Structure formats: C-alpha cells, structure tokens
Image (spheres, rainbow, N blue to C red):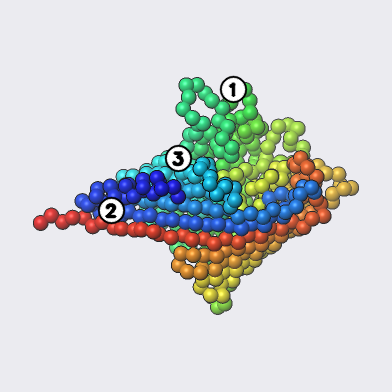
C-alpha cells in the first residue's frame, strides 16, 4: 500500500474519532492479503495445440475503512491491488493495478429503511442473478443506488436498486464500450421467511447498447424467484427464472428460462452433507439463428464459477455457442474437525438444444463430465488455507463447439485439468466504539 494512502486513512480516522465524541459511533479498519497459485491445463477453454499449460500466482491486497455514526450513517471505502507475481519490476513506479473496489454511503432513514449509494457489491441468494464474484481476485462491484427495507422480526426484506453508466462526462452521447458491463440496470428483490419455508421474488432489467448506428438500448428482463424448505436434516431449494427482451446484438430474446433444484441431507456424526442437484438453462438451437431469435438464458452477472463446474467451461470462459446447459450434479462435503472441510462434486453436462450436427458424426448432446475437489483448513482465526482440483472429461461435441469458437486448433487428445492453492489472510486491524458523552 502506498504511503500517501496510509497517511490519508490515518488523517480520516483521526477526524472521525474527534467528530464522534458526541455520539454512539464506530470506526474500523480491515485488511486482506490473498495470493493464489493456479496450474491451468485447459481451464475455461481447450488449449491450442501449439501451447502447453500455464502456472502463475495472482494476489489480491485490500484495505478497507468503515465508519458508522449513531446508527444513522455508514461510510465504507475499500481499496485493492490485484497483480500477478512478477508482472512488475522490482523498481516499478506505476503499476496500474491499484483501484477503488468499494466506496459507498448508507443513510438509515428509519430503523428499517435505508438508502445506499456509490460503488458497492450486490450479492444475493444463490448469486445466479447478482453475485459478488469473490472467487475472482478483482471481485465484482456496481456503481448503483440501493433502497432497502429490512425487518428481522417479520423475516422480511425488500431491495430496489438502479444504475446508469457512462464512460466519462461529455457534451453529447458517447458509445458505452466498457467491457462486460451494462448501460443501465434496475432490480427488485422481495424476501419473506416463514418457519420452515422462505420465498424470494426477483425482477431484473438490464439495458445494453445494441450494435446499430443510433446505439439504441436493448433490454433483457428477467423475473422469477426461489423457494427454500428446511425440515430437520433435510433442505431443498427450487429456483426458476424467465427472460425476454432484446439482446445487445439486436436479437429478440424470447422464451429463455432457468430452472434449478438442490436437495441436501446433513448428518451430524460424522459431519457429512450430501447434495443432489440439477440446473437447466435454455439455449438457442441452430435453426433459431435464421430468424434472429435468441432463446438462451443469460446469467452473466451471477457468480457462475460456484454453480456450473469449477473449471469454468460454461458462462465464465470462452462461451459454448449459446447451446444452453443441463448440469446434473452429486456432491458430498465432509468436516472431520471444526477447522477442516473437504468437498467432492461430480457434474454431468448436456446441451438441451438442437446443435445442428450431422447425426452420422455426432450421436449425442453430452458435453462432458467433471470432477471437482476442494478443501479448506483454518490455520488460525484470521488465516485460512484453501485449494482444489478440477478435471474435465470433455466429449467430442464439446471439443467441436469450443474449436468452432476459437481461432486456433484444439488439442483433442489432451487431458484438461486445473489445480489451485491459496492462503487467505483476512484481518480486522482496528475497531473502536465511541460512547456518547453524558452531560452532568
């Protein structure tokens, strides 16, 4: 962290401490250092025949400062540096990796109603529609306004958010060309909990500039929700969404859908958790492209790494030609001791659409099978060791889809696997509460 930022934070902290002498307030500083080693041999997409696997270490460094004044106002700022070890020289002056991850203010109008504005993480439920993408070193944050009603006694929540983006201040309309972002977004989430069942309703509208001369916005609207059920050691989650509108490539989006089911059973001795699940995301058949119709469900603001296989062949990497996905999975989690956790998950991937391949060449829509192994060990209170391994057994169908999207020849005979190891140091550096002064 650069000295100028440390000086800035120290000055701000001193001012807030002095300002808080007449109220019930709180000031805290948090820090995180998270390096991660990765071995990539066909991660996200199949490798070019001309190249071998890759290995590197990427590190996230964050410093966050928060201030809460009398339960009326909260300020939060989080800086981060994301870099690959060795990407800058020992005497580097300007790395270009330092940025503002979050910077927001939250105003509590009543004990249950608040307004939050600024750069912030929007992450809810299973993170299928809006996720924080904490797996990625850079994370995901939005420049947005958020209205929230929250009543714990009623087990009720309502969030309404909106965002409008531009490249920079201008006197006339400019093309919005920020990679993997939207021009405008609005969402509504309503959650109500009961004794054994929870219900959540979602409505999400995303506007992107279409690739036509006047830069007209195309809107993709998503609505649906999820139901959670829990009874003793058994729990279930049913989730479904419907999507329609117009894509950024000026295609009509019709009849796109996502349906998901998770069944969980938890044992206490030994501590085991079994998961059976299925995800079905609609795709666009080979015949739909002729009439400019798109029926593929778009989950691109979700944390897809956690949902559709850790090797990230679907909805994270180079894409899979909008053919949709059926993901059937079976998982087991084992906690031998409180500080250790192991998980193993099997995925079966299938394309639920017409691929347009000749039957004499391809007889199945099976995309492949994947095995994901993960572990987590808490070394001490603020230090955690995590790692994993993923192996994809891709089919000929998957290889042809990936090869058709690439500008190189795919190595069809190579085993595709990926391994990672990270140590996460997440420490609260300072926290102080200020009691209100009592006049005599």
Front disc: 1 or 2: 2
- Residue at 36% over, 47% down: 7
Query: What kind of element bears circle 2?
Result: strand
Residue 218 on image: x %, y %: 59, 31
- Alpha carbon distance from label 1 to label 2: 51 Å
Residue farthest along the right direction in this orientation:
360
Q: Residue at x 35, y 55 (%)?
A: 28
**Vertical placement of residue 394 versus 249, above or below:** below
Q: Earlier in the sequence, mark 1 or mark 2?
A: 2
Q: Can residue 111 be seen in this view?
A: no
Q: Is mark 1 on a helix, strand or loop?
A: loop
In screen coordinates, is 250 left or right of 159?
Answer: right
Q: Where is residue 212 in the image (x, y as percent from the top left)?
A: 63, 25
Q: Name the residue under label 2.
A: 25
Tell me the tag on residue 214.
1
- CB atoms at circles 1 and 3 under 8 Å apart? no
Tag shown at residue 144: 3
């Amino acid at each position: 962290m650069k000295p100028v930022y440390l000086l800035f934070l120290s000055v701000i902290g001193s001012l807030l401490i002095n300002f808080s002498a007449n109220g019930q307030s709180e000031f805290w500083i948090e820090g995180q250092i998270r390096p991660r080693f990765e071995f990539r041999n066909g991660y996200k997409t199949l490798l070019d025949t001309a190249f071998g696997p890759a290995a590197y270490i990427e590190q996230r460094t964050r410093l966050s400062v928060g201030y809460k004044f009398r339960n009326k106002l909260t300020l939060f700022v989080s800086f981060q540096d994301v870099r690959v070890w060795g990407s800058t020289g020992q005497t580097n002056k300007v790395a270009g990796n330092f940025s503002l991850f979050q910077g927001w203010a939250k105003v509590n109008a009543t004990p249950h109603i608040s307004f939050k504005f600024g750069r912030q993480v929007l992450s809810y439920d299973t993170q299928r529609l809006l996720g924080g993408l904490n797996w990625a070193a850079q994370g995901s944050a939005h420049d947005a306004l958020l209205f929230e009603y929250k009543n714990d006694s009623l087990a009720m929540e309502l969030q309404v958010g909106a965002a409008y983006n531009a490249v920079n201040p201008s006197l006339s309309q400019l093309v919005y060309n920020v990679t993997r972002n939207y021009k405008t977004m609005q969402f509504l989430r309503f959650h109500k909990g009961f004794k054994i069942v929870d219900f959540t309703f979602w409505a999400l509208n995303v506007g992107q500039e279409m690739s036509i001369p006047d830069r007209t916005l195309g809107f993709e609207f998503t609505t649906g929700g999820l139901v959670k059920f829990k009874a003793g050691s058994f729990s279930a989650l049913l989730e479904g969404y419907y999507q329609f509108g117009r894509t950024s490539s000026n295609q009509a989006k019709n009849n796109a859908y996502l349906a998901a089911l998770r069944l969980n059973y938890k044992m206490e001795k030994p501590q085991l958790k079994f998961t059976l699940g299925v995800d079905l995301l609609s795709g666009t058949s080979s015949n739909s492209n002729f009439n400019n119709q798109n029926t593929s469900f778009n989950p691109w603001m979700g944390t897809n790494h956690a949902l559709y296989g850790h090797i990230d062949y679907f909805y994270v990497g180079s894409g899979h030609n909008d053919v949709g996905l059926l993901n059937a999975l079976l998982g087991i989690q084992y906690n031998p001791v409180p500080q250790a956790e192991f998980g193993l998950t099997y995925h079966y991937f299938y394309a639920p659409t017409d691929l347009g391949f000749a039957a004499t060449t391809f007889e199945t829509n099976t995309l492949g099978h994947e095995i994901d192994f993960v572990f987590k060990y808490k070394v001490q209170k603020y230090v955690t060791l995590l790692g994993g391994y993923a192996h994809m057994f891709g089919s000929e169908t998957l290889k042809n889809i990936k090869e058709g999207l690439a500008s190189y020849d795919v190595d069809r005979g190579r085993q595709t696997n990926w391994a990672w190891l990270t140590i996460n140091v997440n420490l609260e550096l300072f926290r102080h509460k200020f009691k209100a002064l009592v006049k005599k």
